[in-house]
Amino acid sequence: MKVVRSVFRFVWRLPRTVLIAVLTGYRAVISPLYGQVCRYFPSCSGYALEAITVHGAVKGSYLAARRLIRCHPWSAGGIDHVPAHDHRDFARLPRESTPRIVMLNHPERYLNNELDRTESLGSSNRAA
């Protein structure tokens, strides 16, 4: 029974894993050639990577396609975060369990916690 469950889980996660690999490759190879030209934060590839990581292959691809349609030269741009997942709240998970792309795309949520933690470590070192 465990083998069947493992095979099912592998097949179920395969499209998501392939899309994440393609987006990661794009961000490593092609995206640096363009530079910072995106009108939105996070960039379209960062948005797509987070959407697929959080929502899965189908809904994440839909959200990424909607974002790509909105991204054009006449767009005002701005901050456009991926909608929160109905059942997963990464803010309540330990930092180690939160995907890196979620932390990078939400600096206001995770950077403040990191700065507070660094300051508390620094003040405890000074007191010693």
Image (spheres, rainbow, N blue to C red):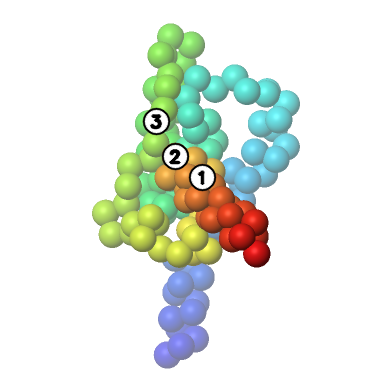
> On the image, numbered disc 1 is attached to which residue?
111
In which quadrant will I find the N terminus?
Answer: bottom left
> On the image, numbered disc 2 is attached to which residue?
108
Q: Which mark is residue 128?
A: none
The residue lying at 48 percent from left, 29 percent from top is 41
Residue placed most toward the observer, 3 or 67: 67
Residue placed most toward the observer, 58 or 112: 112
Mark 2 or mark 3, which is nearer the start of the sequence?
A: 3
Q: Amino acid at mark 2?
A: Glu
Residue 42 x %, y %:
49, 33
Q: Amino acid at mark 3?
A: Asp
Mark 3 or mark 1, which is nearer the start of the sequence?
A: 3
Residue placed most toward the observer, 125 or 104: 125
In which quadrant will I find the C terminus?
Answer: bottom right
> On the image, numbered disc 3 is attached to which residue?
80
Query: Dot 3 surroundings within 10 Å: few (below 14), some, or many (20 or more)?
Result: some
Residue 118 x %, y %:
58, 52
The residue lying at 49 percent from left, 60 percent from top is 95
Using the rendered image of the protein, determine whether residue 18 is visible from the camera's viewpoint.
no
Residue furthest to the bottom: 1
Q: Are marks 2 and 1 in contact (CB under 8 Å)?
A: yes
Q: Determine the CA span between mark 1 and mark 3.
A: 18 Å
Q: Amino acid at mark 1?
A: Leu
Q: Determine the CA span between mark 2 and mark 1.
A: 6 Å
Front position among marks 3 and 2: 2
Q: Is residue 98 above or below residue 112?
A: below
Front position among marks 1 and 3: 1
Q: Quadrant of residue 70?
A: top left
Residue 23 x %, y %:
59, 43
Using the rendered image of the protein, determine whether residue 104 is visible from the camera's viewpoint.
yes
Residue 45 x %, y %:
54, 36
- Label 1 residue SS: helix
